[in-house]
Image (cartoon, rainbow, N blue to C red):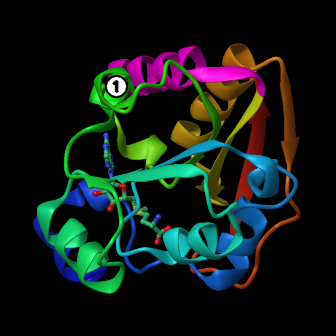
Amino acid sequence: MFLKEFIKNKSTGALCASSQKLARAMIKDVGLENAKSIVEIGAGTGSFTQLILKEKPQDALFFAIEQNPLMAKELLSKFTNLDCEVCNAKFLAQMLEKRGLNAVDLVISGIPWTILKNEEQDELLALIHKNLKRGAYLSTFLYVLPTLAKRKFTKKLYANFSEIKTSKLVYGNIPPAIVYYCRK
Ligand SMILES: C[S@@+](CC[C@H](N)C(=O)[O-])C[C@H]1O[C@@H](n2cnc3c(N)ncnc32)[C@H](O)[C@@H]1O
């Protein structure tokens, strides 16, 4: 599915789904266990979704956003009761409003940042930052590839968030990745 969609339309940004090692790293020390509201952006076929559903508080409000209809179809076939918006994350504010929220406790994002246009990166980062509660985290990852696009995007993360920690290199992922824990 990933490879097919990548060839057809590069917007998936990955040749295969993330590993469970990366999923574990994504939810480490970001307050998932106490979060009341959680959004996953770019859920794909659910590598992170599965773990979020398992580890979040039972009564937490959780929804996923996935813009690719084929990915979303597979996601919903795996997690039949999942609250999933099949659209672009740029409508985040409207999706929160629909659920009676104006900010959330945690955003977990698998968005393929480095293949987005500059303006899209800026718009989405600003939107996520605006819709996080103070002290809350955006947990997101980048593949460890020595590209200019990665360097430029990392700078943007540091410019937008007051505090950033990183995970150890997650080798058990193709390609290896690093998680950025960005605190508002
Ligand atoms: C690299 S894949 C990650 C999928 C999954 N989280 C994983 O790690 O296996 C990125 C996903 O983000 C979705 N995506 C990219 N840009 C998006 C956007 N602006 N809004 C919503 N989804 C987006 C893509 O369709 C794709 O499924």
Q: What predominant SS class does the magenta segment belong to?
A: helix
Above-or-below relation of 29 to 73:
above
Which quadrant would the C terminus be assigned to in this image? top right
Q: Position of residue 111 (x, y in %)?
A: 44, 49
Residue 95 counted in the magenta span: no
Give residue 95's quadrant in the image. Answer: top left
Above-or-below relation of 2 to 177:
below
Residue in view at x 64 percent, y 80 percent: 173
* Left or right of 109, for residue 13: left
Q: Position of residue 178 (x, y in %)?
A: 74, 58
Which range is magenta? Answer: 118-135
Residue in view at x 23 percent, y 70 percent: 71
Residue 127 counted in the magenta span: yes
Q: Nearer the viewer, residue 131 or 161?
A: 131
Q: Position of residue 149 (x, y in %)?
A: 52, 38
Residue in view at x 61 percent, y 66 percent: 52
Above-or-below relation of 117 to 39:
above
Which quadrant would the N terminus be assigned to in this image? bottom left
**Whether the residue under disc 1 has CB within 8 Å of ligand 1:** yes
Please state which amino acid type lies under the numbered disc 1: Glu
Q: Nearer the viewer, residue 61 or 70?
A: 61
